[in-house]
Image (cartoon, rainbow, N blue to C red):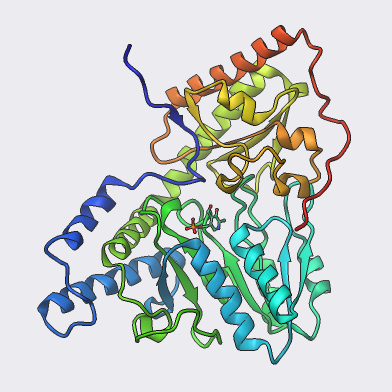
Amino acid sequence: MKSRKPIYLDYNATTPIDPAVLRAMLPYFKEHFGNPSSNHPYGKLVKGALNTAREQVANLIGAKPNEIFFTSGGTESNNYAIIGTAFAKMDEGRHILTSQIERPSILKPLRYLEEKFGFKVTYLPVDEHGIVNPSDVEQAIIDETILITIMHANNEVGTIEPIEKIGRIAKEKDVVFHTDAAQSCGKIEVYVDKLNVNLLTVAGHKLYAPKGIGALYIKTGNTIDKFIHGAGQEMGRRPGTENVPYIVGLGHACEIASDMLHDFGQRAKTLRDQLYNEIFDGLGEENMKLNGHPELRLPNTLNISIKGIVGEELLSQIPEIAASTGSACHAGSTEPSGVLLALDLTREQALGALRLSLGRWSTQEEVYEASQLIVGNVKSKRTNNNGSQIISLESEKGTREPS
Ligand SMILES: Cc1ncc(COP(=O)(O)O)c(C=O)c1O
């Protein structure tokens, strides 16, 4: 029997490398191997490639090339933004604002600052759609607040935060504002000036570049301490010989994402809504709940809770689908996602969640097949259980994970 690859519905966890990105990278593993710091033709050629990539990343987010610093990915960019700002500004104050639905690469460096350096962090709640209220941000700012870090779009439910409004408040109050745009770059418009941010995180593998490469946007004039110490690469702000092939790949991926942004958004949204409608038609309104904001959401992201199922169990029974029940970092854990609990879902609703995220190569046929597999499996489970195991979506609320 010919085995088929599972239908990939986990583009928020990672994306495959675009073949055009790979083609652009390959010469930099072979003939263009020079060190960008070398003052001879081998070095100059790759230095030029770095400059092009810097421009390509800058163009995607409306920044200047000299405001782009290459890193090893989203995690490093987030750590650099937070720890770098904290160390540069700790004499002015030790208070930071964030939300309860951030990634570990935001929450863990914040914990580190709390435990080792006596910082105080306010973890702002979100509403039932996962939105941070800008007036909560305004009220939480105190004289000692030196940084606000709030993600642009949530990786699990896709909710897009009101970054522009929060940025305006941060600007008025003269507080540095960072946003983790790992999930939004390449999926929706991300323009640093419009968003009013000082710092912004880009992660390569969420936009069809390789894993292990990313960038931090640092607005001109922004004070931030160096995170890694060494030689003078990256304008002295991120030492270490540059990962040239991956940087070239990131640049190319940003250029492609820029060109495709509008069409991708339309196409992903159509497929996502088809997926939702087909599952909805199969299971009925009373058996499913949409998680995240109905409109202010990434066009490719569908997160639903299905009544009476445990997401992990369901997906283990459908090997034809590769999807997620929370973020990739929660994989293997049976604990409900802290993000979903922060949106006030019950423990059962959170455990019954599926995250289905679409991408550049998702097709209508795949969406149809996936929806039929999900509906068929849920229904057969119901029949086998004779309805007795069905968990109410309205049952008792779960305990919140520490944020
Ligand atoms: C919103 C967000 N930020 C940061 C990261 C971490 O990025 P990286 O895997 O490049 O370290 C992820 C990855 O899942 C993410 O979804």
Q: Position of residue 207 (x, y in %)?
A: 42, 52
In the image, 321 versus 200, the foreground residue is 321
Using residue 221 as the reference point, say whether residue 131 is left or right of it.
right
Looking at the picture, does residue 130 appear above or below residue 281? below
Q: Quadrant of residue 131?
A: bottom right
Q: Nearer the viewer, residue 230 or 142?
A: 230
Q: Quadrant of residue 286?
A: top right
Side of 348 where 252 appears, left or right: left
Residue, far right: 396
Number of labels in the image equals: 0
Q: Quarter of the image holding residue 171?
A: bottom right
| Identity of the residue drawn at 28% across and 52% down | 21
Q: Residue furthest bottom?
A: 91
Provide residue 314's location: percent of width, then percent of height: 62, 24
Q: Is residue 199 visible?
A: no
Look at 45% across and 52% down and name the residue there: 206
Q: Viewer-proximal residue, 183 or 160? A: 183
| The C terminus, quarter of image | bottom right
User: Can I make out residue 229 in this image?
Assistant: yes
Residue at the image position 66 percent from the left and 58 percent from the top: 102
The residue sitting at 72% across, 34% down in the picture is: 351
Q: Is residue 122 above or below residue 285?
A: below
Q: Position of residue 215 (x, y in %)?
A: 44, 68
Say which quadrant the N terminus sits in: top left
> In the displayed structure, does residue 53 sit left or right of residue 120?
left
- Residue 105 at what x, y percent from top left? 59, 62
Residue 392 versus residue 329 in the image, above or below: above
Q: Is residue 255 left or right of residue 225?
A: left
Q: Residue lying furthest front in this view?
A: 116
